Image (cartoon, rainbow, N blue to C red):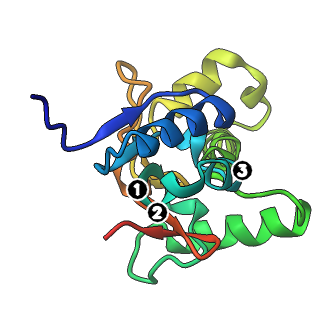
């Protein structure tokens, strides 16, 4: 018989994701349930009920209220969290909250030396393609003319939701 070490719940939003997690727990399956950052919300954690204890979230450090000072993203995450709370005190900060913040940050860094050319899409793209080792909220950003992706391993962590907050999984 199969003995999985984990189950990946690839649901795209909290209601179906919570149903999947609950069903796994009801079946007596006790392996970790791994979900992506789109389910890293308190709504999902609460809807998952008893299954919440076995859920691991692949999420952003930005959702954690405490990030060690030694972390290269700590200052940006703290600044982002403070501004987010100031602007939207009643809105939950989740992993996906940092996406727009980094887009604005990267655009600002790339456009800084362009002056009015920042409005030229080609000039802005070329400036973005020169960015190297730019610390954001989600991770350290690097681009090139042939790669518009960045491996954000510095900002991603396995999390658990315990005592009403996000903590690194042990």
Q: Element at badge 1?
A: helix
Q: Residues within 10 Å of mark 1 (few under 14, many from 20)?
A: many
Pick whichever of labels 1 and 3 is earlier in the sequence. 3
Give x and y (percent) for residue 80: 69, 64
Q: Quadrant of the N terminus?
A: top left
Numbered badge on residue 160: 2
- Residue most toward the bottom? 69
- Compared across the picture, whether 62 is left or right of 129 comes to right
What's the CA distance linking mark 3 and mark 2? 14 Å
Instruction: State which mark lies toward you, 2 or 1.
Output: 1
- Residue most toward the left? 1
What's the CA distance linking mark 1 and mark 3? 16 Å
Instruction: State which mark lies toward you, 1 or 3.
Output: 1
Compare residues 27 and 71 and report the one nearer the observer. 27
Q: Element at badge 3?
A: helix
**Is 127 situated above or below 47?**
above
The residue wearing badge 3 is: 43
Give x and y (percent) for residue 78: 63, 73
Give x and y (percent) for residue 143: 41, 33
Numbered badge on residue 54: 1
């Amino acid at each position: 018989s199969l003995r999985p070490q984990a189950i990946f719940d690839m649901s795209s939003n909290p209601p179906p994701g919570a149903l999947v997690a609950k069903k796994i727990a009801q079946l007596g399956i006790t392996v970790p349930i791994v979900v992506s950052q789109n389910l890293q919300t308190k709504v999902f954690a609460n809807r998952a009920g008893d299954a919440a204890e076995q859920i691991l979230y692949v999420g952003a450090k930005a959702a954690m209220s405490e990030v060690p000072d030694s972390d290269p993203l700590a200052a940006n995450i703290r600044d982002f969290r403070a501004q987010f709370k100031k602007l939207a005190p009643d809105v939950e900060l989740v992993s996906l909250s940092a996406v727009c913040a980094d887009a604005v940050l990267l655009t600002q860094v790339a456009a800084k030396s362009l002056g009015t050319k920042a409005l030229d899409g080609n000039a802005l793209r070329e400036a973005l393609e020169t960015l190297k080792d730019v610390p954001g909220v989600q991770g350290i950003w690097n681009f090139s003319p042939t790669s518009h992706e960045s491996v954000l391993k510095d900002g991603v962590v396995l999390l658990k939701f315990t005592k009403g907050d996000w903590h690194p999984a042990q």
